[in-house]
Image (cartoon, grey):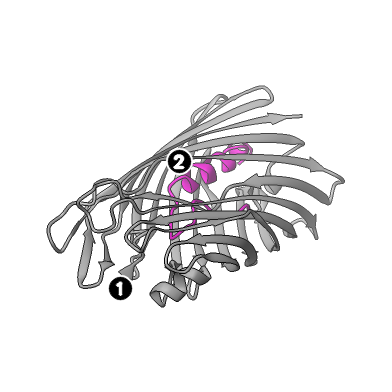
Amino acid sequence: MKHIVGLTGALTFVASIAHAGALERGKPPGSTILFETGDLVEFSIRAVSPTVSGVSSTSVSSGDVTHGYTQMGLAFRQEMSPKFTAALVFDQSYGANTKYLTSAFPLAGTKATAQTNSITLLGKYQLDRNFSIFGGPRMQTFNAQASIPGIGGYTATTETDTGFGYVIGAAYEIPEIKLRASLTYSSEVTHRNPTVETGPAPGSSVSTTTLPQSLSLDFQSGIAKDTLAFGGVHWVNWDGFAISPAGYVATTGGPLVSYSDDRFYYTAGVGRRFNETWSGAVTVGYEPSVGGISPNLSPIDGLASLGLGLTYKSGDMKISGGASYIWLGDANTNVAGPITGAFRDNSAIAMGLKFSFQL
């Protein structure tokens, strides 16, 4: 099984570029980099281009309401001793970018953005040959903006807030067959953003938003020479999540964005090393729909994805690239009063590159 070493990181990267549930744009950093070998630095970039449109009950098209985005990632790993490894990871796991541009649609002019940046310090301690534990603190910034002309010219702009959480986990390995099962818990992070609102109830207040806790179970195992199978399930506790600026709640009686159901995301795939230089992988992903009414600022309910990836290795350098096609789940929205929206047959394309350098 020694010939399959180095493929794992590429596989998890290809799988993760297909992920998009609620405001989540990818799993928070887990244990992957801790199980690489040697001291290394990684840089990744992802570009996602969704196409999401719907039709109101009055037969007016919304046009494309979601817009492409890019994500950056950076990670550093160092073996401190034979039993202890440390890593520093930067990621952008949550975000949103929605704009209703079609003038005839009831929500014309509505737009919203959200952005997070996180830094996680991780440490892994090898208890024995098979078992290890890992974890560390997580610092995260969050800000958001919204504009809804149809509600009296309403706008909301937050200042950036910094919140703190943590990551903990454990893993079991059988090195001879490259088997590894890991369980990673990421805590919720609460943000208290100073917020300025205009419109029917203008004013300044502090909006409290709690980005949810999550739990990931990841598994891999060699199944033949130079061939690795992998999979996982990722749970996110979106039930009860809400963004509720005071002026918006006073005007409408409800939150700006809310979710009432948890999300589960499943992945599976197979990777193969072709020679000393090239490896490849194919992945599938699935997030079941939860039904009900989806938020206007996130008119997607579930997804399915197919991804392909390649890794090129030369000396101390490794370059991994992947692309996924994502079938976005149909969603129903409550556009305005008795007017509803139906978003059907939407999709996205995601591409990514990761550069790894042994130090």
Report which quarter residue 75 is drawn in.
top right
Residue at far left of view: 59
Residue at far top of view: 314
Pointer 1 or 2: first along the chain? 2
Q: Give me the residue at 58% from left, 36% from top.
A: 44
Report which quarter residue 173 is drawn in.
bottom right
Q: Looking at the picture, does residue 191 appear above or below residue 1?
A: below
Q: Secondary structure at mark 2?
A: strand
Residue 234 placement (x, y as % from top left): 51, 62
Q: Looking at the picture, does residue 275 appear above or below residue 32?
A: above
Q: Mark 1 sits on what residue? A: 292
- Range of magenta residues: 1-30
Q: Quadrant of the C terminus?
A: top right
Q: Mark 2 sits on what residue? A: 69
* Amino acid bearing label 2: Tyr
In this rendered view, identify the residue nearer to me: 11 or 147. 147
Report which quarter residue 299 is drawn in.
bottom left
* In this picture, residue 202 sits left or right of residue 159: left
Q: Give me the residue at 63% from left, 34% from top.
A: 43
Q: Looking at the picture, does residue 151 appear above or below residue 176?
A: below
Q: Secondary structure at mark 1?
A: loop
| Residue 311 on the magenta segment | no
Answer yes or no: is residue 65 visible: yes
In this rendered view, identify the residue nearer to me: 349 or 333. 333
